Image (tube, grey):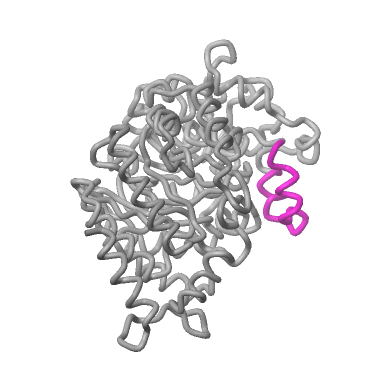
Amino acid sequence: MGKYASNFAGETHRFADLKTVLAVASPRRSGDELAGLAATSDAQRVAARSVLANLPLKEFLNEALIPYESDEVTRLIFDSHDESAFAAVSHLTVGGFRDWLLSYEADTTALQNLAPGLMPEMVAAVSKLMRNQDLIAIAKKCEVVTKFRNTIGLPGRLSTRLQPNHPTDDLRGIAASTLDGLLYGTGDAVIGINPATDNVPNCLALLDMLDGLRQRYDIPTQTCVLTHVTNVIEVMNRGGAVDLVFQSIAGSEAANAGFGINLNILREAREAALSLHRGSVGNDVMYFETGQGAALSADAHFGIDQQTIETRAYAVARAFRPLLVNTVVGFIGPEYLYDGKQIIRAGLEDHFCAKLLGVPMGCDVCYTNHAEADQDDMDTLMTLLTAAGVTFVITVPGSDDVMLNYQSLSYHDVLFLRSNFGVRPTPEFELWLEKMDMVDRAGRMRVPSPQNKTLLRLIGDSHANAA
């Protein structure tokens, strides 16, 4: 029948090549249907998964989904592959790899040692054979620790990005939202602003305000304005207070070109940030954002399903030793992830695939207002991701980002996760909360009151500083 063929329900299903098998084996999602890559029936989907399960992992070393000669992401994937690390699973099929990942033998240390030997296409393939509980169970065993001014990714910890966006970049409004988030104990991953006006002078002003706030209260966290990487380079040239270099990335050279970047630009920016030596406990200086559908929306997916091309972006991230990476899982829209079910599945896939590759993955648990999703779906996803050991989540005031006009998690959602799962912020940030008398003896956030002089001073000083 050929290596890409299978009999199922009395019918023979044949697939042209490896990327067709991967696409047809994917769980249903609107982006693959939009691209004409999805399975035409459940029977065909199961047949493709049967082919995939019996495919040797070594097959991915022999067939590039995008030609090596024409794509620098492909070259990065193949050139950085660690054969000695891969040896531990090189004898397995994709189905056998799934079974091994679920075994006791595949513990945290084994998975950390394996990560450099895994290609993203292998990881995407095995995810397509998994139920949601499998994705959670295996990701929970993955431990990826990174450091800048605090230590992110330790077991039993859940970090948060405090996202105080404002539709006009008003410094007082941003300061008020930042203060609000700090009072809920959020912001240990990063205090990060998406600027409404994306230019160098505005970025300098925003960074100066955030860095002043951080230094005033000696907050052990990092700040970031999520501007284009070329803007960050210029900000650094002008002496701006840059902690982290941010950039959206994708899984093909062409898709990255759509973002106005290539690997050399990322290398230049990383070297510039490293030279500033602004970290205190480490010097992981990169912050990347990804999301299923980015390559398809740029018409740069090369016939690869959106989850597999997304996973290739994690190889780009891994090469630059980032402090943070997050998927904006529902942000790109229902054309790519139609409803809550698809968003939840994609969030678990992205987290699993990135963690297995050794990437410190967080998630913007989010949806756009025209998707068939609601906040109950986000409650489900944030709960499942916390069970899976997600590195961090993004939080905004009241779940509603008033600048980007989409729905995410709120500051108080983190209180639920900390209370129900016992997850804590980074050790350094936790000590700061204690020093500021912002938590009680049980580690619970205090409510501001006339008796709490520290909180009242923080509130008063921050309002005065913003004014």
Specify the quadrant of the image occupied by residue 259. Answer: top left
Which region of the structure is painted magenta?
96-116
Q: Which residue is rendered at x = 42% and y = 78% of the image?
A: 445
Q: Nearer the viewer, residue 437 or 370?
A: 437
Image x and y of residue 11, in percent: 51, 32
Relative placement, left or right, of 151 versus 228 is right
Q: Is residue 112 magenta?
A: yes
Q: Which x, y percent locates residue 82? A: 74, 31
Q: Residue furthest top?
A: 69
The answer to whether residue 65 shows anywhere in this view is: yes
Q: What is the quadrant of the N terminus in the image?
A: top right
Please identify the quadrant where the C terminus is shown. bottom left
Is residue 160 left or right of 151 when viewed as pictured? left
Q: Residue at 24% across / 41% down in the picture? A: 196
In this view, which residue lies farthest toward the bottom? 451
Considering depth in this image, is 370 or 40 the residue closer to the camera? 370
Q: Residue 18: within the magenta? A: no
Q: Is residue 38 visible?
A: no
Residue depicted at 55% across the width and 19% down the height = 72
Asked whether 456 or 84 is in front, the reply is 456
Q: Please name whichever residue, 381 or 345, is drawn nearer the observer in this view of the structure.
A: 381
- Asked if residue 66 lies left or right of residue 190, the reply is right
Measured from the top left, where is residue 452 in percent x and y?
37, 84
User: Is the magenta region chiefly helix, strand or loop?
Assistant: helix
Percent position of residue 6, x then y: 58, 31
Disc tally is 0
